[in-house]
Structure formats: C-alpha cells, structure tokens
C-alpha cells in the first residue's frame, strides 16, 4: 500500500517543541507523554527532540494502519534508534522483520498454539502450586516479601520446567533473571535519549554489558550441548536447534542463542512484571479485591489450582484484562517507515520514526470512560466488544502480535488463583507506585507485602 505524500490536503504534523518536552520527559517521562497524547487528541504529532523527531501515533485507527493495514511499510528496524539497545541483547530473529522474522515465527509458533498450550496446563498448574507452597514459611513467620521478586520466581520456575524442560536449570535461571532485570532497567537512558550514539557512554551501559556477558556465559553452553544432540523433544531449545532459517540452512549458534534469550526473557518478564502491579492495585481498590477473593474462594477454595478451575475464573480474567489496559508490560512499539506515507492526513517521509504506545492509547478518554479508573467491569463479556480493536492492544497487533499471548493469559490466571486461594496480601506502603522507564512497564519502587494465610483472614 502506498500514498502520495504530496497530495492536496496532506499536511505536515503539528510539532511539539523541545523546550516543552525534553525537561519533563527526563523528569517524568510517562506524565510528559500522557500530557502530549491528551493535547494531541488523536492527531499525529511530531516531537521535536533536537535532530530526533519521531511521530507520536495514538488514535486507534492510525495504530491499526501501522500495525496491520500497512504493516509492511513499518518495520522494527534493528538499526533504528529505539531498537539499538534491544538489538544488543536479542540480535535478530523473532523481533526482526521480513524473511528472518517469518522463519523464527514459523519455528516457534507450534509451541505457542492454543492447542499446545492447552496440553501444558496441568504441568503449569502443578509447578505454580509448588512454587506458591514455598511462600508458606514467609506467611507463617510474618516476613514481608518482595512481590516483584516472588512473582518473577514463580514465573521462571514454571517457564523453565514447562517450556525449556530443564535444559535451563533452576540455578542458571536464578542467574539469568537478575541479569535480565538489570538489562531491562539499565537501558532507561538509551530509551529516553535514543539519539545519543552508542559510542557516547550513558548511565547503565556498564551494567548492561556485564549482564549480557552473564546471559551469554549461561546460554551459549546450553545451545552448544543441544546442537550436538537436539533429540526430538518439544522444548524451545531443541526446537530451535532442529529448525532452519530463512535461507533453508540450520540456525547458527548465535541465532539459536538470540531466540532462546528472547523467548526466556519475554516469557518471564511480561507475566512477572504485570502481576507485580496487581497487589498495589488490589489494595487501592478494596471492592475489586473483595470480588476477586470471593471468586477464588468459591471456585478454588482450599484445593490446589487445576485446569478445570480456569473456566470459573471469569472475574479474574477481567481483572487481568484491566491490569493490561493500565499497565501493559510492552508499553512502547517503535517503528520505522520504509516509504513515505500519510497517517490521519499527516505526511510522513521515508525513514520516519513512529512511536506507538498501548500505555497512552489505552488511557485516552475518547475511547474509555474514566480511563484512569481501575474498572474490570469494562471487560464484562459483551461489553468490551464495543471498543475499537486498537484502543486495546497490550500484546501488539497484526502479524507481529505477541506469540505468547495465550500462555500469558493461562499462566497469569493460575498464579493469581494459586496465590489468593492461600494468602491475602497486606502491603507495607499505602501509596500506589508510579511507572519506571525500562524495557517493560514496571513499578518505580519495590512492592513489599506480608502474606496472611486465608484461614486466618476468614476467621478474623
């Protein structure tokens, strides 16, 4: 699809000058971006950040144009400014475009199909229940826990058992997860200041490089061992070691490494970070918490969470959907225009950078009533169908929609049900944390909470 960028009626984007954006963008990036999105009111605007001048696209029609209707013109350019720090960790593959991406997606898609994920639910439920059991001692002792660390632990124990089949050991995962955490936070300045060349050092660069070395020290030996004898297993590493790339040749050691790191990071980071937001949200909304607790008590009770419980966890799913609306883990989707285009009557030249953000679009009052309020009832069956498809896109959209969407939804429901069938959270702080600039949308401060055994709470 192509457009005449010089056609009559086509205009240049309204510009937001640097003196209005950069100071607040550094001090309060999410507040600054929200203010710009509200002022734009659905119009495509251009952010003037020195010589770096990206277009901010928030209108759902325009988002659909970029992510689906004209998707071939908007690439996740590995050399693009926003992708540079990510590319240094993940390389090419599932996050690329064109034949390379198509080959990676084709290789991994069978492992994430609804049918295959359904076959893994029992194993996921068992691992989650066992991981939640480990929290008993903290509850008995009244010892506060770091919610983010514990959500991450539960998720990565489940992921390595179910999707990596123990090719990654618990000990290795316990080294990888902090390294990935460091990577996610250390690139903050690179994300905020993407126009700064890699040769110019920024805070976090050294920590980033150390963390990447840690990842490589763990993953490359795993890949080499598997390549010698991949077998016929359906774990992610073996699947990639047997796979072929866009050129029809077996994947190189580097390609397997890149996709293994991408899939491990995505599978653990997204769910763990989102569920960290759940606990302060429940504390801030006791009416939501009460209804959620009642559902888990009725459906799961004192049982260990199982596959058959999922069908009864309708409100739990609504809570997660609303959590994804306000706190999408993937908060920024940059794209580079291959050719000139017109979006909403605004002219874009070739190589223009386009910024799309679920965090911003999903908070627009043009599409959501009281958008900053946490209201799971928005996702009552039959209600959310009236919302524009691209007013809510926490997993992206079009052909590049997140491959692990179905895994996330199943795993997150099981974790919430397993946690709340055993415990009630009591947070150390009453304040709702703000978001932190990182690769994923995480709370800016640690979420510490004490777990109260359910029987003690019910008896009170």
Image: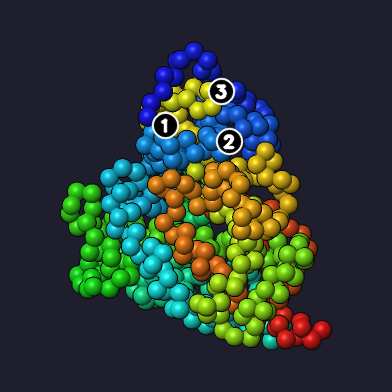
Left-right relation of 287 to 384: right
User: Where is residue 238 shown, x and y percent of the image?
Assistant: 28, 68
Which labelled disc corresponds to residue 337?
Answer: 1
Mark 2 closeness class: few <14, some 14–19, many ≥20 residues within 10 Å:
many
The alpha-carbon separation of the residues under discs 3 and 2 comes to 14 Å
Left-right relation of 162 to 452: left
Identify which residue, 158 or 178, lies in the foreground. Answer: 158
User: Where is residue 61 shown, x and y percent of the image?
Assistant: 54, 36
Q: Residue furthest front?
A: 382
User: Where is residue 386 shown, x and y percent of the image?
Assistant: 61, 47
Q: Earlier in the sequence, mark 3 or mark 1?
A: 3
Q: Earlier in the sequence, mark 2 or mark 1?
A: 2
Identify which residue, 15 or 115, lies in the foreground. Answer: 115
Which labelled disc corresponds to residue 13?
Answer: 3
The alpha-carbon separation of the residues under discs 3 and 1 comes to 15 Å
Q: Which residue is mark 2?
A: 59
Mark 3, mark 2: which one is toward the viewer?
2
Identify which residue, 458 or 437, lies in the foreground. Answer: 458
């Amino acid at each position: 699809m192509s457009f005449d960028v010089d056609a009559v009626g086509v205009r240049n984007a309204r510009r937001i000058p640097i003196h209005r954006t950069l100071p607040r963008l550094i001090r309060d990036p999410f507040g600054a971006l929200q203010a710009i999105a509200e002022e734009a009111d659905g119009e495509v605007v251009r952010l003037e950040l020195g010589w770096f001048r990206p277009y901010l696209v928030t209108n759902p029609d325009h988002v659909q144009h970029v992510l689906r209707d004209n998707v071939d013109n908007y690439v996740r350019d590995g050399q693009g400014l926003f992708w540079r720090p990510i590319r240094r960790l993940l390389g090419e593959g599932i996050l690329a475009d064109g034949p390379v991406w198509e080959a990676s997606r084709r290789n991994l898609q069978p492992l994430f199909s609804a049918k295959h994920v359904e076959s893994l639910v029992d194993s996921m439920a068992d691992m989650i229940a066992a991981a939640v059991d480990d929290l008993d001692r903290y509850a008995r002792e009244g010892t506060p826990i770091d919610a983010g660390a514990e959500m991450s632990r539960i998720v990565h124990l489940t992921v390595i058992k179910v999707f990596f089949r123990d090719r990654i050991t618990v000990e290795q995962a316990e080294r990888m997860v902090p390294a990935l955490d460091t990577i996610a936070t250390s690139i903050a300045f690179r994300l905020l200041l993407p126009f700064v060349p890699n040769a110019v050092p920024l805070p976090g660069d050294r920590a980033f490089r150390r963390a990447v070395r840690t990842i490589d020290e763990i993953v490359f030996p795993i890949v080499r061992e598997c390549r010698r004898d991949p077998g016929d297993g359906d774990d992610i590493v073996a699947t990639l070691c047997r796979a072929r790339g866009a050129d029809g040749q077996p994947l190189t050691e580097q390609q397997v490494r890149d996709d293994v790191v991408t899939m491990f990071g995505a599978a653990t980071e997204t769910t763990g970070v989102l569920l960290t937001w759940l606990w302060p949200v429940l504390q801030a909304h006791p009416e939501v918490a009460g209804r959620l607790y009642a559902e888990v008590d009725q459906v799961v009770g004192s049982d260990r969470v199982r596959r058959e419980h999922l069908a009864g966890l309708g409100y739990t799913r609504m809570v997660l959907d609303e959590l994804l609306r306000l706190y999408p883990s993937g908060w920024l989707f940059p794209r580079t225009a291959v050719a000139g285009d017109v979006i909403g009557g605004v002219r874009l030249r070739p190589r223009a950078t386009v910024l799309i953000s679920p965090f911003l679009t999903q908070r627009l009052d043009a599409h959501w009533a009281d958008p900053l309020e946490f209201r799971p009832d928005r996702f009552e069956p039959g209600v959310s169908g009236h919302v524009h498809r691209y007013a809510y896109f926490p997993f992206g959209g079009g052909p590049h929609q997140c491959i692990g969407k179905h895994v996330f939804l199943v795993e997150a429901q099981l974790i919430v049900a397993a946690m709340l069938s055993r415990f009630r959270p009591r947070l150390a702080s009453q304040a709702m944390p703000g978001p932190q600039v990182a690769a994923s949308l995480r709370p800016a401060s640690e979420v510490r909470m004490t777990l109260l055994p359910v029987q003690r709470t019910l008896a009170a």
